[in-house]
Amino acid sequence: MSTVGRRFFEVAFLFEFGMGVVAVVIAWSFGLRLWNHFSVDSASLGVSIVATGLALLFYLLLRSLPFACFRRTVDLVRAIFRSELQSLPTWKLALLALAAGFGEELLFRGLLQKGLCNLSDGNEPIIIVAVSLLFGLLHCLSKTYVILAFLISVYLGLLFLWTDNLFVVITVHALYDFVVLLHLRFERGSSATNDGASG
């Protein structure tokens, strides 16, 4: 693995994981115990697997649409993957996906969504949209990527509202990211092989 790839992994992992730690500390200082919304059992595992499958179906559907904005976004993500993540071993991709699920869900679903819902009774849909707008804007690779991040955040927000279980949304987020990263790696390898065969 290159020095740049190793450095990118370290910074990204610490940033994502650190975001979760900061969210837990801030929530705790305001009396919100995020661990009270964390439950691991067979039902939550089943919900996580089904919900991840639905999110991945959404991903595959978007990949199949013939719109230029989606194609440009896929190309952008692929370019980032190629330059920063392609050389990472699979276990590091898994760790990065887990850190993203952990950090982003503790911050956006745990601290922000749960905290704001506790403060304002009955405004959950508005809060989910507001938190998702912030989530989308903080994923500003392109306009299309912001919209897609917003939509996946609404999905995760509704999932958290329904389950009240951070384990579910962390797991869905992490599994989704990991499978997409693996897909990008496999797709990259396939296209390189196909290009070589046709040339």
Image (cartoon, rainbow, N blue to C red):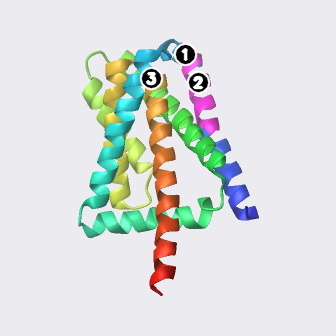
Q: Amino acid at mark 3?
A: Leu
The quarter of the rendered structure image containing the N terminus is: bottom right
* Secondary structure found at label 1: helix
Residue 9 placed where, x, y %? Answer: 67, 52
Question: Residue 24 shows which numbered tag?
Answer: 2
The residue at 35%/32% (across/down) is 51
The residue at 60%/59% (across/down) is 85
The image quadrant of residue 17 is: top right
- Please, is residue 144 above or below residue 28 in the view? below
Whether the magenta-drawn stretch holds residue 189 is answered as no
The residue at 51%/29% (across/down) is 106
How crowded pointer 1 is (Cα within 10 Å; few <14, some 14-19, many 20+) is rated as: some
Q: Amino acid at mark 2?
A: Val
Residue 16 placed where, x, y %? Answer: 59, 41
Distance, label 2 to label 1, CA atoms, is 9 Å
**CB atoms at circles 3 and 2 under 8 Å apart?**
no
Residue position marked by numbered label 3 in the rendering: 45
Q: Which residues are magenta?
A: 17-28
Left or right position of 164 against 192:
left
**CB atoms at circles 2 and 1 under 8 Å apart?**
yes
On the question of residue 146 being in view, the answer is: yes
- Please, is residue 187 above or below residue 191 in the view? above
* Viewer-closest of 74 and 87: 87
Name the front one of labels 3 and 1: 3
Question: Residue 35 shows which numbered tag?
Answer: 1
Left or right position of 17 against 58:
right
Name the front one of labels 3 and 2: 3
Mark 3 vs mark 1: which is more N-terminal? 1
Magenta span main SS? helix
* Viewer-closest of 75 and 37: 75
- Please, is residue 66 above or below residue 13 in the view? below
